[in-house]
Image (tube, rainbow, N blue to C red):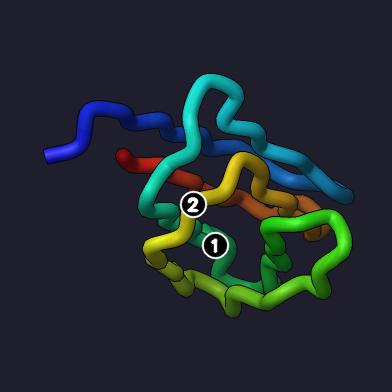
Amino acid sequence: MHANFHSEEGTVNGTKQITFSKWKPKKVVITNDSVTANLEFKFNDSESYGTLKPTETISMYISVRDIYLRGSSIDYRVWGIG
C-alpha cells in the first residue's frame, strides 16, 4: 500500500505541465481519454514526446516530479502513486 496519491484530470489544449510538488511518486499512470486523437507525454523538458493513442493507458514505475502533456483539446487522467 502506498502512502501518497495524487490524481488529476482535465483537457489539455497545447502543452500542460503537471508537477508533484511535495513528493515524487514511485508509479505513474497516464490515460488518454480521447477516442480520436493522440496524447503526447514526457517526463523531462529535454526529452522527446512519447505518444498515447486514443483510449490508451500507460502505467510505469518511475520516480519523476514533472509530467509534460501535449495535445489539442484532449481529455486525460494522470495518477501519481507512492
Looking at the picture, does residue 38 appear above or below residue 64? below
Residue 29 in the image: state x and y as whole percent: 42, 56
Q: Is 13 placed left or right of 26 in the picture?
A: right
Q: How many marks?
A: 2
Residue 57 in the image: state x and y as whole percent: 43, 68
Quadrant in the picture for residue 49: bottom right
Q: Nearer the viewer, residue 21 or 71?
A: 21
Q: Nearer the viewer, residue 1 or 39?
A: 1
Quadrant in the picture for residue 16: top right
Quadrant in the picture for residue 35: bottom right
Q: Residues within 10 Å of mark 2 (few under 14, many from 20)?
A: some
Q: Residues within 10 Å of mark 1 (few under 14, many from 20)?
A: many
Q: Residue at x 66, y 37 (%)?
A: 18
Assign the N terminus to one quadrant of the image.
Answer: top left
Mark 1 is on which residue type?
Answer: Asn
Mark 2 is on which residue type?
Answer: Ser
**Could you say whether the residue bearing mark 1 is in a helix, strand or loop?**
strand
Q: Is 70 placed left or right of 66 in the picture?
A: right
Assign the C terminus to one quadrant of the image.
Answer: top left
Q: Residue at x 59, y 74 (%)?
A: 52
Looking at the picture, does residue 26 appear above or below residue 71? above
**Mark 2 vs mark 1: in front:** 2
Identify the residue at the far top of this view.
Answer: 22
**Could you say whether the residue bearing mark 2 is in a helix, strand or loop?**
loop
Name the residue carrying label 1: 32
Q: Is 79 placed left or right of 34 in the picture?
A: left
